[in-house]
Image (cartoon, rainbow, N blue to C red):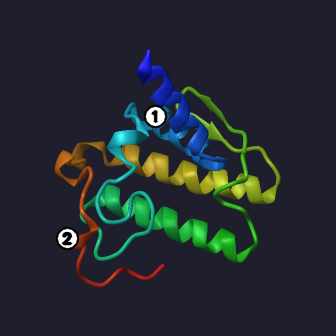
Amino acid sequence: ESKGLVLAISEFVVHGSLLEFRKMIKQATGKSALPNYTTYGCHCGVGGKGTPKDATDWCCLHHDCCYSQLMAQKCHVITDRYHYTYRRGVITCPDSWCKRSICECDKATALCMKRNLQSYNKKYRFYSNIKCTGRKPRC
C-alpha cells in the first residue's frame, strides 16, 4: 500500500518531458530509468562534471548538450510535455518544432543507451560526483 503512494509521489514530482523520457528509456532499453540511469556516472541525471565514465555516460553528456542547444532556442526542455509513438522499436516524434526537438534529443539518448547496454556497468549507478574528475568535454 505504501509502495503505491511512493510511486504516485515520484510520478507527481517529475514534470513535463522527463515523464516521456523515462518511459522512452524503459521502452528502448528494457530498464527503468530509476534507478538504472537517473544517477548513472558523471552526466546522467542533474548536472554533470568531469570525464564521462563509459559509453552510457557519454549518451547522457550528449543529451545535456542537446538540451542546452534547445534552451538557447527558448525551448522549455524540462516542462514542455511532448507526444511520441513507439512501434516495433521505432520512436516517432510528431509535435511542433520545440516539442519535436526535445523528443528527438530524448530519442537519440534512449537509442544510445540501448546500443550500449552491453557496456552498462552497475558500479556507476548512484555514482558520487566527487569521483567525477578531469575536464568535462565541450559540446
Say if 28 sits above or below 127 in the image. above
Q: Position of residue 16 (x, y in %)?
A: 67, 47
Q: Which mark is residue 131?
A: 2
Callout 1: SS: helix
Label 2 is placed on what type of residue? Answer: Lys
Q: Tag 1: Cα neighbours inside 10 Å, few (<14), some, or many (≥20)? A: some
**Quadrant location of the N terminus?**
top left
Side (left or right) of 109 relative to 78: left
As drawn, 138 above or below 35:
below
In-image side of 10 versus 81 (left or right) = left
How far from the left and from the top, in percent, is residue 127?
Answer: 24, 58
In depth, the one of 98 and 3 nearer the eye is 3
Q: Work out whether 55 lies above or below 123.
A: below
* Horizontal and vertical percent position of residue 105: 58, 57
Identify which amino acid the numbered label 1 is placed on: Lys
Sequence-first tag of 2 and 1: 1
Report the disc number at residue 26: 1
Q: CA distance from mark 2 to mark 1?
A: 27 Å
Q: Residue furthest left?
A: 123
